[in-house]
Image: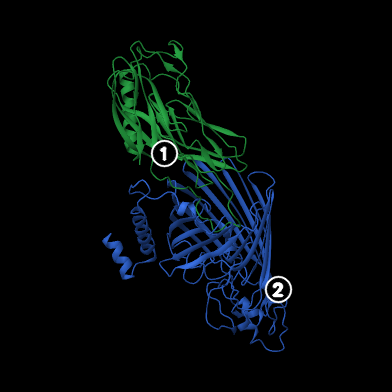
Amino acid sequence: MTSFAACLVNGVASDFMRTWCGLVATVLVLAAVPTVAGAQTLPSEPVSLMSGRVTIGAEASASISSNDDPGWFNYTDYEHNALRLLRLGATADVRLGSRVSVLGELRTENWEALRPYALYIRVRPWANRAFDIQAGRIPPSFGAFARRNYSGSDNPLIGYPLGYQYLTSLRSDAVPATADDLLRMRARGWRPSFPIGSTGVAPGSPLVTAFRWDTGVQVHWESEPLEVTGSVTTGTLSEPHVHDNNGGKQVAARVAWRPIVGLVLGVSGAHGPYIADDVTRILPPDVPRADFSQQAFGFDAEYSRGYWLVRSEAIVSRWRLPAVRAPFINDPVRAWSASGEGRYKIRPGVFAAGRYDYLGFSDLRGTAGTRSWDAPVHRMEVGGGYYLLRNLIGKISYQQNWRDGGLVREHRIWSGQLNFWF
Amino acid sequence: MIHRLMVPLVICCAHAAIAGSPARQPRWGEIGATVSPVPVVSGFSRTSQVQSAEPLGSIRGRVEIRRSVPVVEPRPSVGDFGMPAPHDQPDRFRTVVYLESAPAGAFEGRSGLPGGRGRMTQRNETFVPRLLAVRVGATVDFPNEDHTYHNVFSLSKTQRFDLGRYAAGQSKPVRFDRPGIVRVFCDIHSHMSAFILVFSHRFFDTTDTDGRYQIPAVPPGKYNVMAWNDGAVRDSRTVTVSEQGGPVELDFVLR
């Protein structure tokens, strides 16, 4: 414990040590929480207070990888690598009445400041109708992956699907003046820079981020076998915001159909202004003021039976950028991702999983010729998990990435994770 | 807390194995089997009792739960679009009362009986019953009566199993061959959990809705009687069944 404490206090620990120190410390703290029975053991059920009106859960996960990621394949921004991450989170559901709840999740990653990942009020106007309204920092209506619990076997692997994590070179606070400016940033989504707008370096945007949720209002209606969800939010799929930065709202919707038990088919769509006002305000007056928006469509499917769970998801997104100077970016730039994953339970408490991902980009004509505006990426990840307890899973995975551009074009990495929740 | 029950269950198993040599163990059908006077335990049918030449007694009484029983709620899921589906609260007031130890010979000839068949249903996102007591060799069915998938599993050392996902109207069985405690969960619904206590002898009973129990056909002797509720032994008492047999009243108050 002394060495763990020392590394935490001194702040000189490596990512590896910091991650594992954190997990061990967390488990020790949790182990000290007395259960109802009075025994010193890890809690296994959420804490329920005030006759069930307040329910509190928690999650701790620590991921490590065998080597660094010089190609930035798994980074979620300039600081955070999804395969080297300590995440602590607490969720709460406070019922203010039979039809009103407040839900929230606080998270910290790598011991940084706590931030509200989710915080919203849920209202069910009619008791006998499955119609709900949610307002605040709400779960994304679009797609399926971003709403999954990371804990447990909901994500059977350690990495994320490319469409929800990989950083493209687009930014909402800075835009390229020419097609060449954008092509120059191929495979540099971890730190792109452009001449218009914020001139500093900053991470780009994924197609849909799974690491921040947007702020707005959401309605949901369900009647077997259909489920319809719609929302109006301040940001976009790529750039969720608490405070609006462009005065426009994103509209998103998803329709899910459950024809049989175990099968879910979903289609999603979203449209919202992407570029910040700080950028459009300084555009030259002769630049056409188009709808600088992100528009996306998605399809997701899940089927499970017996010991199998299979999922697939496809996303197509396009962003319209200002056409400032020649060579112009006249058409919206497009990107698409497709992923398929499967999990199979080999025996009680042991499962194997695999995922294949592809992320592609549309072509763009520059001075030197026509190329995709960002470098296409393939990812393959295989792994497995072992339940040490019902709510403590150890996972291991092997991931290989290929990219058609950038300094690092191929990267192989092993990673491990401990994940505990209650 | 689990070890506290595991130990006596294993002791009982070992005792029965030692005491009952193959020559002395009655084969099923050779002995006169009678229907138990004990009411059918919720979820489990006790099929037979063994007649004995010596006078037998019974231990019966009532278990009163005075401790607060926490409400079971699902883990908060901020990713949901609406109110979670309503679910039943599990019955956490049932108690298993069993003999922890017995003098030599008490279990003779009673270890070779078939374990019977039990049932633990998945209904309204709850296991019914939440507490089930069976004998070694028993087969328990796990029917799904909900409209959604369930995935019953256990990682207990006594019996590890995973039934996979199956839909409404389907059922899968598990045979329990070792004594001990089996904690049962659903892999999809984190708030679903249950207990199965597997005994190597027949001297146990589960309380009914009024908290009453009866352990019949107990040979004369001095016994430790345990009351097990919601994951732990909550109380234990010592009683003596006289040589003349007859009922012994024993009540528990669990705080």
- Above or below for B198 versus A371: above
Residue A71 appears left or right of B251: right
B223 or A397: which is nearer to us? B223
Three-letter amino acid code at disc 1?
Ser
Q: Which residue is mark 2?
A: A332
Residue occupying the point 72% across, 88% down: A286
Task: Return the x and y of residue B14 as percentages of the image width and height.
Answer: 32, 25
Chain coloured green in this rendering: B
Residue A364 seen in the figure: yes
Q: Secondary structure at mark 2?
A: loop
Three-letter amino acid code at disc 2?
Pro
Color of chain A here? blue
Task: Return the x and y of residue B177 as percentages of the image width and height.
Answer: 43, 28
Q: Which residue is mark 1?
A: B156
Residue occupying the point 56% across, 69% down: A167
Residue occupying the point 40% across, 50% down: A43
